[in-house]
Image: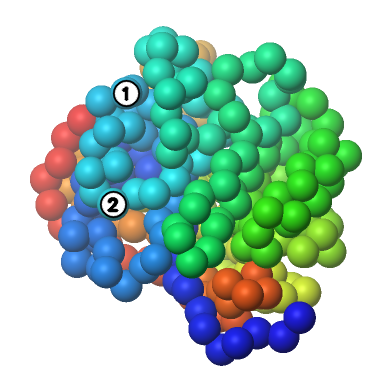
Amino acid sequence: MSGDGKTIKILFFGDMVGKPGRYAVRDFLSENREKYDFVIANVENASHGFGLTEKNYNELISYGVNCMTSGNHIWDKRDIFGFIENADKLIRPFNYPSGTKGVGSRVFDLGDYKIAVINILGKVFINVVDFQWDLVTEEIKRLKEITPIVVVDFHAEATAEKICFGKYCSELGVSAFFGTHTHVQTSDETIINNMGYITDAGFCGASDGVIGMEYKTSLTRFVTGIPERYEVADGKSVQVNAVEVEIEPSTGHTVAINRILCSRNEEIKE
């Protein structure tokens, strides 16, 4: 099916970390929200660096986020179990076992077109979920019967797993594939088989720490090997890592992809 020339723009924010990440996203959207038809953000670290509270979920909606994806830290705040079933903009990884609260994919109806989003957790170095390949194959096929626009957030540790799974998803007709979890934006954005791809979208939060967390605590953990509670880094300098894709609604094909990296100085503390 050939395109009709019309396109939509989808913006995807890498993992936001704590209040610095939330406020960095808030400020970016206050200046740029009108440029995008749909906004997705990974929120598994949005509340004090681990998990998501209902208060922060509603806060992010007020900023203009349409869909929230997550990962292995989605369960870290206790109140997630009290609101996830009613959170119609939130997705947890699809390949958690059957019966897990929440949903792993959603279809968003924007009137003239629909956008399907699926969140998947990798197995390499994480290994707490079901094997993703067969499960996701069937789910992507199901979503493609509803809409040609299918977006994947693959929350995974290993670069090789992300690249391989990304190529596999492109063969299934996925429109855009965003790697998350490692918090370091990669410079390999490209289009594979009409699918926008990046190995990792990066993170939104304090850029003075270690992937959004306080440097001294991170150093102590690495030097001593003794577990110590991570703290979100002070937001004296914050960054936004995001990726925008331009997609033909009629075909689901990505025709352009652009990586976003911006920073600003402001005093934000968790």
For marks 1 and 2 on the same chain, the one whose residue lies earlier in the sequence: 1
- Please name whichever residue, 16 or 237, is drawn nearer the observer in this view of the structure: 16
How would you rate the neighbour count of disc 1 (Cα within 10 Å): few for under 14, some for 14-19, many for 20 or more? some
Q: Is residue 103 above or below residue 42?
A: above
Q: Quadrant of the N terminus?
A: bottom right
Question: For numbered disc 1, what is the local secondary structure?
Answer: helix
- Please name whichever residue, 70 or 1, is drawn nearer the observer in this view of the structure: 1
- Relative horizontal placement of residue 212, taking residue 134 as reference (left or right): left
From this viewpoint, is residue 269 visible? yes
Residue 166 at x, y percent in the picture: 75, 58
> Label 1 to label 2, Cα distance in Å?
16 Å
From this viewpoint, is residue 203 visible? no
The residue under the point 36% across, 68% down is 36
Residue 6 at x, y percent in the picture: 52, 83
Q: Marks 2 and 1: in contact by CB < 8 Å?
A: no
- Relative horizontal placement of residue 264, taking residue 77 as reference (left or right): left
Q: Write down the residue under mark 2.
A: 64
Residue 79 at x, y percent in the picture: 38, 13
How would you rate the neighbour count of disc 2 (Cα within 10 Å): few for under 14, some for 14-19, many for 20 or more? some
- Relative horizontal placement of residue 265, taking residue 45 as reference (left or right): left
Q: Is residue 35 above or below residue 60?
A: below
- Please name whichever residue, 15 or 173, is drawn nearer the observer in this view of the structure: 173
Amino acid found under the numbered disc labelled 1: Glu
Q: Write down the residue under mark 1.
A: 54
**Dividing the picture into quarters, in which one does residue 56 lie?**
top left
User: As drawn, which residue projects farthest toward the left?
Assistant: 267
User: As drawn, which residue projects farthest toward the front?
Assistant: 111
Amino acid found under the numbered disc labelled 2: Gly
Q: Quadrant of the C terminus?
A: top left
Residue 122 at x, y percent in the picture: 72, 38
The residue under the point 62% across, 34% down is 104
